Each structure stands twice: as C-alpha cells, then as structure tokens.
Amino acid sequence: MATSYDILDQERETPSVVPLANAVNWSIFRRRADAEHHIDRMRLSPGHQLIGGHSHDSITEYWWVGVAVESIGQWGSRQAINKHGRLGD
C-alpha cells in the first residue's frame, strides 16, 4: 500500500478533543517521525480510511493517526472504539 503523510500536515485536534464522525481508533505521537512509522505499519480493511493531523497541547506539538469507518454499526458497538495516547494519559 502506498502511504502518504499528507494527513499529518492538517492542523486538526484528535477525535478525543473534537469528535470526528466515524473515527474508531487513533494514536497520538510526540514526534512526527513516530506517526509516520505508525502509518507505514497500518493495514486498512475495505471501508476504512486513514485519518490524522497535528495540534498542540499544554506541553508541545503532537501528531495523531487513526482510522475512520463507513459505518459505526458495521464496526461494532461504540464501546469498541479505541484511543491510544489520549491527552492526559
């Protein structure tokens, strides 16, 4: 799969700060290189879309990468939504 890091250029808060429709899984990184490394290892299923961006918190800048699905109903229950590296963790 050809990867693009363009999503990391978008200034966008994580879905844990500003909800994003159908976002079901995301991870936060303090270094852009770590976010790019994560993208390189992601494998998306049909109907899944790569999402991400960058923003700031009270400490410094961060980058995040995640997955959005066409339908939350097809993903499973809302309790199956995973977020890694949430702000404050």
Image (cartoon, grey):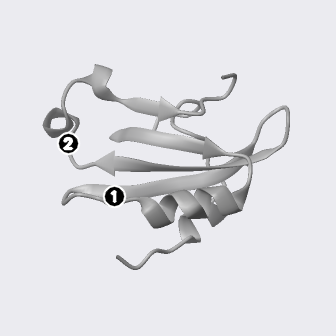
Q: Is residue 48 left or right of residue 66?
A: left
Depth check, front residue: 20 or 29 = 29
Residue found 40% across the figure and 59% down from its top: 42
Depth check, front residue: 52 or 36 = 36
Q: Dot 2: within a 10 Å radius of its alpha carbon, few (fewer than 14), some, or many (20 or more) residues?
A: some
Task: Name the N-terminal-most of marks 1 and 2.
Answer: 1
Q: Is residue 57 left or right of residue 13?
A: right
Residue beneath label 1, please? 49
The amino acid type found where label 2 is placed reads Ser
Q: Position of residue 56 (x, y in %)?
A: 77, 43
**Mark 1 secondary-structure assignment:** strand
Q: Position of residue 63 (x, y in %)?
A: 66, 51
What is the quadrant of residue 20 in the picture?
top left
The amino acid type found where label 1 is placed reads Gln
Residue found 15% across the figure and 33% down from its top: 73
**Mark 2 secondary-structure assignment:** loop
For the C terminus, give its image quadrant.
top right
For the N terminus, give its image quadrant.
bottom left
Residue beneath label 2, please? 71
